[in-house]
Image (cartoon, rainbow, N blue to C red):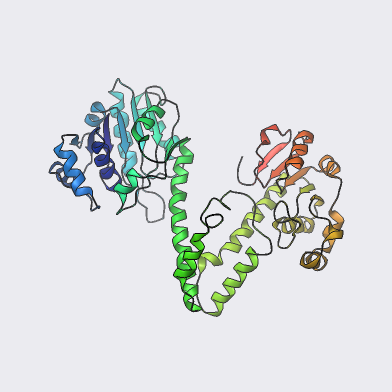
Amino acid sequence: MDISVFGLGYVGAVSLACLAKEGHNVTGVDIDNTKLDLIRSGKSPVIESGMPELVQEVVAAGRVKLTQSTQEAIAQTNLSFVCVGTPSQPNGNQDQTAVLRLTEQLGAALKLKNDHHIIIFRSTLIPGTVMNTLIPMLEKISGKVNGVDFDVCFQPEFLREGTSIKDYYKPPFTVAGVTSNKPKEVFEKLFSSLPGEIIFTDIATAETMKYFCNIFHALKITFANEVARLCESIKVDPHAVMELICKDKQLNISSAYMKPGFSFGGSCLPKDLRAINYIAKQNDIDIPMLKAVLPSNRVHLDQALQKIMLSGLKKVGFIGLSFKTGTDDLRESPLVDLAEKLIGKGYMLKIYDPEVNISKLIGANKSFIETSIPHIGSLMTTDYENLLNTSEIIVVGITDRNLITTLIETSRTEQIILDLVNIKERNKLNAKYIGMCWE
């Protein structure tokens, strides 16, 4: 294929070299003449393992052209990768000067081109940038229509400095945000030889997941470092601790607990967080990230409370009370906390949980009920249908399949369903639907 790459920093230079290595004719575009001269002479513009040899090889093979002209690059190619920088501004916002300037030039170049062209943004962009800013700009300047005369896509990159060539050839997956089906064949042609699934999604999702991939990496590094600081204070080897943590691929290093939902609770997580924070405080160790976990969990609960209050309705039915589906454990259940807050604000509650029978609770669970929330028992009902019929707003806190099916069958248009568990068949509900953090 005839491909142009705009911006010859780490991502752009590596992309240019690897695409040329695979036999494509690649035109590199940059405003920095020094970078262009280095590549012309067979040298890498970035310090990166394997790049000097790779650049020398593809330039010698005659598969690389270089230019400062956007119009020339667009005219000579049918596919463009945009890899220009998007650094931070002093206030933390993204500096989009380069990508906006280039988009204006791309629009002008598209105006003069008769053939269909595909533009793939790889620069990290604030979610919504492509759809709300870049595509309208291209359409206005070119006088053409995205999805008809040209196609715009977003493909996040996962290249780490120092191992970028290795990462290019061994991605975990290839994510492509698209607005039409036309570019899909091109992505298959370009990347089907690489390991990992090619996943097509909408552009905003692709933009957003790139940010949170990076943030998750930062989170993991910070977690390991906070573990290390605390371990040092209590004379424990942090490497041994983290090595054991990482050996658990069922819960720790897995997709477990990685689905958006309601606040966490139960007899383990809250108390262990408090204990670790207490140990850190005793030893004068600052662990700000771990210190913020419980407050963040509380903010999530308060958001559910706000959604109920904004409804203006007072008769609330709870489906579920325990801290998770399939248990009768009410200790530190976020649903209990939510119920307590609503009671305190004068809401009328009915609560149904098939696993919770107040009269049969024993041990610590019974003690918790008797000492902390003795009034909850009077709000619980065994008549599920009555709860559904008499509640104005229904809070779904457990994922019992039979209960959800009945809810779907009996819901009414004047009711509101607040979903804390991500009901899969919510499109069948007659009631107004409100997701915890989703639509």
**Residue 368 location (% of width, % of height):** 78, 66
Q: Is residue 314 left or right of residue 14?
A: right
Front-most of residues 99 and 157: 157
Which of 225 and 418 lies nearest the eye of the viewer? 225
Q: Is residue 224 above or below residue 94?
A: below
Residue 216 appears in view:
yes
Residue at the far left: name it.
41
Which quarter of the rendered picture does the N terminus lie within? top left
Percent x, y of residue 106: 30, 32
Tell me, yes or no, if residue 33 can be seen here. no
Seen at 73% across and 63% down, the residue is 331
For image coordinates 39% across by 27% down, the residue present is 185
267 sits to left or right of 351: left
Q: Residue furthest top?
A: 114
Q: Which image quarter is the C terminus in?
A: top right
Q: Nearer the viewer, residue 280 or 418?
A: 280
82 versus 273 height, above or below: above
Above or below for 169 versus 358: above
Q: Is residue 386 left or right of residue 24?
A: right
| Residue visible at 55% across and 67% down in the picture | 291
Q: In the picture, residue 55 is in which quadrant?
A: top left
Q: Give left or right: position of 26 versus 331.
A: left
Location of residue 146 in the rendering, given as x and y in whole percent from the top left corner: 41, 26
